[in-house]
Amino acid sequence: MKMYNTLFITTFCLVTAFFLSAGENSHAGNSVELRKVPPPEIIALDGKAKLLYGEFIKRQLQKRFPSLQDVVVSDKRYMFITANWFNELRAATEDFIDKQVPELASQPELPAAYGATYTMLMSSIANIAVAKRYKVKASVLIGVVTAKNNKPWGKIKADGKVRAYLIALTEDGALIYDFSTRQLVKGKEFPNKEYINKMLF
Amino acid sequence: MIFLKRMHLKIVCKKLLVTGFLCLLTLLLFSGSALSEKNDTYILPIPGTFIPALNNDQSVRYITADTIEALFQQQSKEFKVLYRDRDIKQYIIPQHAWLKDMTDSFLTLIRQAKLKGKADTWDCENYSALLNALTTVRIWEAGYFDTRGAVGWLRVDAKKEWAGLPGVMHALMFAVTENGLFIIEPQNGQFVRLEAYPNKQFIQEVFLF
């Protein structure tokens, strides 16, 4: 009798283990690879992360860009990252989207909401990396900026339409990135800086 | 002889028991404890292919931003604004069961990545924004490039506890499915209809992108 009990318990354990593992990996058939991002490179000042308050950034931006109608700031404090790490984050985000949606490359134009979705993914990758490594109460400033396309910029012709770009706060100041042409420029050199009308980060 | 056979069987059983126990222990320790990883990549769980909600004639269901805004306006006395992408005319409605699958795989992801809330760096807004973005990417993957999902996130000055989280200023995800407009807590996957959400009247800002 004891022997059968033992056999029963063993079988029960194995079956339970099988189902537990199957439940945990129920998405194992559907998975995607995400390229590892190198450790965060944040700018320090006197041994602490260099920070800017969200409200301060908002006031500065409103003073600097009279055309700015709307600024939505989500967090209290923001940190500076290196331009090098910004490029790593960009590469990881693009790699993730390309692997999930390989058909995107053959599309004539980027899908609707591409800019906002790209920004949320990149910001998530950045903030997860920082949260896992540092005890800093601030977030990486990665957001969306929209501007009237009144002046040409590289491959982008001036058509007067509102266009969305990514903005990030780095050691080199603000960086502006165009999603479709993959052009990158410092905020100061952005040709349509006088026509910026919205920012969200 | 019979005694020896029984002894042998007992030993086999004991061995089986020990093996079973070790298998169980190993599986419990390693299943879902961390993101699977190769040398230079992480393996992320994702849900099945996006499934849209359908009309009676089997056409895909869409909703406009104005209709979503009206639904929030009806329920919230503190509602201020719905931010939207003016280029998108209509938003595709996900099938409720698929959205549950999406949320479940997101929960698996945050559990495997051992993600925990951290004020200002990785907080409620980040959870909502990430689930929102991953949902949109899945919709593109299904070939719906000219629209985005009728999903987004919102800010609420919550006064009452809901989904195990206290009544404070909070960010949550929302989605429209064939069953109505739902508020979703991305940190634990709880769903509630907007009409039944205890803090519905304190929803202030809605982000449909």
Image: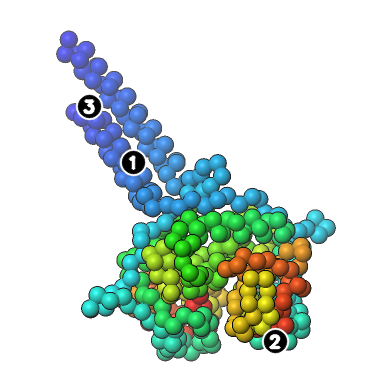
- Where residue A144 appears, x then y in whole percent? 61, 73
- The residue wearing badge 2 is A67
Instruction: Look at 51% across and 65% down and name the residue there.
Output: B130
Give me the chain letter of mark 3.
A
The amino acid type, in three-letter code, at marker 2 is Ser
Distance in Å between CA atoms under marks 3 and 1: 21 Å
C-alpha distance separating marks 2 and 1: 62 Å
- Label whose residue precedes the other's in the sequence (2 or 3): 3
Looking at the picture, do discs 3 and 1 lie on one chain? yes
Residue nearest the observer in this picture, A110 or B169: A110
Image vertical order of residue B109 relative to residue A3, above or below = below
Which colouring convention does the figure follow?
A: rainbow
Q: Secondary structure at mark 2?
A: loop
Neighbourhood count class around disc 1 (C-alpha, 10 Å): few under 14, some 14–19, many 20 upward: many
**Spatial separation of the CA atoms under disc 2 and disc 3:** 82 Å
**Which residue lies at the image location 46% right of the left edge and 63% below the top edge?**
A106
Q: Are dots 2 and 1 on a single chain? A: yes
Q: Secondary structure at mark 3?
A: helix
Q: Which mark is residue A3?
A: 3
- Quick one: label 2 or label 1, which is nearer the N terminus? 1
Residue, disc 1: A17
Q: Nearer the viewer, residue A136 or B58?
A: B58
Amino acid type, callout 1: Ala
- Looking at the image, is B189 positioned above or below residue A17? below
Q: Chain of mark 2?
A: A
The kind of residue tagged 3 is: Met
